[in-house]
Image (cartoon, coloured by chain):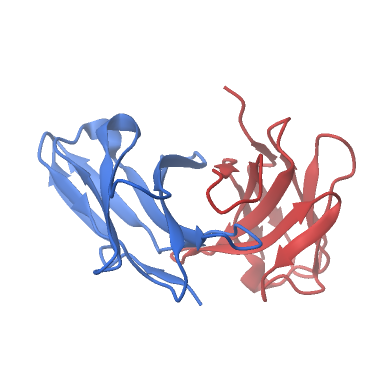
Chain colours: A red, B blue
Amino acid sequence: EPEVTQTPSHQVTQMGQEVILRCVPISNHLYFYWYRQILGQKVEFLVSFYNNEISEKSEIFDDQFSVERPDGSNFTLKIRSTKLEDSAMYFCASSEEVRGADTQYFGPGTRLTVL
Amino acid sequence: AQSVTQLDSQVPVFEEAPVELRCNYSSSVSVYLFWYVQYPNQGLQLLLKYLSGSTLVKGINGFEAEFNKSQTSFHLRKPSVHISDTAEYFCAVSDYGGATNKLIFGTGTLLAVQP
């Protein structure tokens, strides 16, 4: 069964460093998302992406964050200068369509630890 | 704005006992409703979703949920749980007919099945 994959599974970085989290969505999906979950808190929407453009972003997704689809398979989230509060589990998801009814398929997540 | 409340952070239950995980939502518009499950070290997996029609929705692994519009609830149930059902369960909503389909999640409920 097709699945969303994410690398690395765990990333440790120093405050102020740049990190890139990578995702490979399901191959025929066209819509991509990033969510994050700070330990003990809700899973929160960060950004959605379609046709090489951001469709929607949350208040969390400020200028420190960017997303890119550098080739036909990868979807990346970059954090330019990490802060302690960026420590969280980051989930990538993809869906075939953008309608609210469509199922989003999630990857296993990348745990980001900022020291 | 939409919100999802899962009042129980943890639900301990004995194997073969029934279980109900509670979910209430708040929204000024109609929504789609979802339950996702997260097994240890894995991504979020869709259990079931309510789009329209019958208010009783059946999902994978013997789970079902009932949509109650008047009580704005979407509680998840299973008549007899197994050890393997031990996982974190997330309730989520998305806009009905909205321009995007970002998911708004609850804080999750840890179902701990004991032998």
Where is residue A69? Give x, y as percent. Answer: 85, 46
- Is A108 drawn above or below residue A43 in the view shown? above
* Residue nearest the observer in this picture, A61 or A9: A61
Q: How many marks?
A: 0
Closer-to-camera residue (A80/B96): B96
In percent of width and height, residue B97 lies at 57, 60
Q: Residue furthest top?
A: A1
Q: Residue at x 47, y 73 (%)?
A: B2
Residue drawn at (81%, 69%) of the image? A81
The answer to whether one can see residue B6 in this image is yes
In the image, taking residue B60 as reference, residue A6 lies left or right, namely right
Q: Is residue B3 above or below residue B95?
A: below
Asked if residue B97 lies left or right of residue A57, the reply is left
Residue positioned 45% across, 41% down in the render: B46
At horizontal 27% and vertical 47% (from top left) the residue drawn is B65
- Which one is nearer the viewer's eye here, A27 or A111? A27
Location of the C terminus of chain B by quadrant is top left
Question: Does residue A20 appear anywhere in the picture?
Answer: no
Q: Residue furthest front?
A: B53
User: Which image quarter: residue A89?
Assistant: bottom right
Image spot of residue B66 (x, y percent): 25, 51
Residue A8 placed where, x, y %? Answer: 69, 42
Q: Is residue A85 left or right of residue B37?
A: right
